Amino acid sequence: MPRILVTNDDGVHSEGIQALAAALNPLGDVTVIAPHTESSAIGHALTLRRPLRIETYKSGFYAVDGTPTDCVNLGVAVLLKNQLPDLVVSGINAGWNLGDDVTYSGTVAGALEGALLGVPAIAISLRRRPDHVFDFAPSAQAAALLAELVLRHGLPDRTFLNVNVPDGMPRGFRRTVQGKRNHITKIAERLDPRGKPYYWIEEGIDEWTLEDRSDYQAVREGYISVSLLSPDMTAYSAMEGLEALPLPEEWLNDVKTPR
Ligand code: MN
């Protein structure tokens, strides 16, 4: 039986992780370890300045007062006794993780940590609806299908799938690239009862650069977006921009690698 480690950033109590674990159960030995409270937008944070504890939430489900990245590491080291799982799956997040927003996402970070440990990984997210009513069934089904494929065929080294599922019944799958959101973060200023200002970071504006192959375009057209991400953020396609920076010759020691 393959070993599957499941995490998320919405917390161990969330409906999405229950649906995901249930869908993956027929494929292997599923262990769920997730933050004990909602930790969305916590990114790839690692808790280093306080102790962490693992609590049993219910059979096969464990809660940590930490981040998804903490959970993956504690899951491997403690629950799986230092045996790497065959697959890490993170989600199902209540809300998309598309384009540039993947850098904020704790859901995506859970899968990224799997990739860094050398384990094939999948992050999966579902559209957030204004009424907060979710049907996790289609995304759970997609997660199981993709998990089965990844268990059988693997993924390239140090990569993971970022999967986003539209509302309603998906029209199929589309292979995509990371989209670009026109990034305007809205910050609301209000006054507290003592007349001092406080700030609230609000959802960014939903304007996207049009790109036929983008993850955003796929979900907008009703398809499940499947992109392949990597922790390597080097801008390979723009290396000449770095080469054009006039670093002082006498300090410079580039290693020339053939392209
Ligand atoms: Mn979340």
Image (cartoon, grey):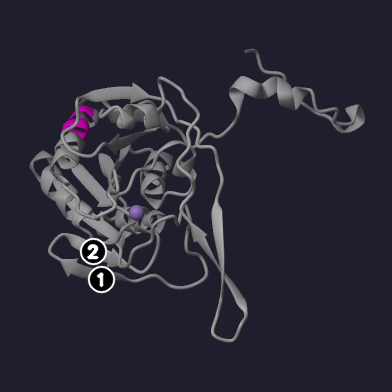
Above/below status of 108 relative to 212: below
Taking the magenta stretch, the answer to whether it contains residue 146 is yes
Seen in the picture, residue 158 relative to 237 is either above or below; the reply is below
| 63 or 42, nearer to the observer | 42
Q: Secondary structure at mark 2?
A: strand
Q: In the rendered structure, which amino acid carries the disc numbered 1? A: Glu
Distance in Å between CA atoms under marks 2 and 1: 6 Å
Residue position marked by numbered label 2 in the rendering: 62
Region in magenta: 145-149
Q: Position of residue 70 (x, y in %)?
A: 40, 58
Q: Is residue 153 magenta?
A: no
Residue in front for this viewpoint, 60 or 215: 215
Main secondary structure type of the part rendered in magenta: helix
Q: Dot 1, how many residues are within 10 Å of its Cα: few (below 14), some (14-19), or many (20+)?
A: few
115 horizontally vs 10: left or right: right
**Residue 22 location, x and y as percent?**
11, 49
Extreme residue toward the top, this view: 259
Q: Which mark is residue 55?
A: 1
Q: Which amino acid, by three-letter code, is at mark 2?
A: Tyr
Residue at point 15%, 34% (across, down) = 169
Residue 135: give x, y in percent of width and height: 16, 47
Query: Based on the displayed image, in which of its 4 quarters is residue 39 positioned?
Result: bottom left
Give the answer, above or below, for where 120 lies relative to 218: below
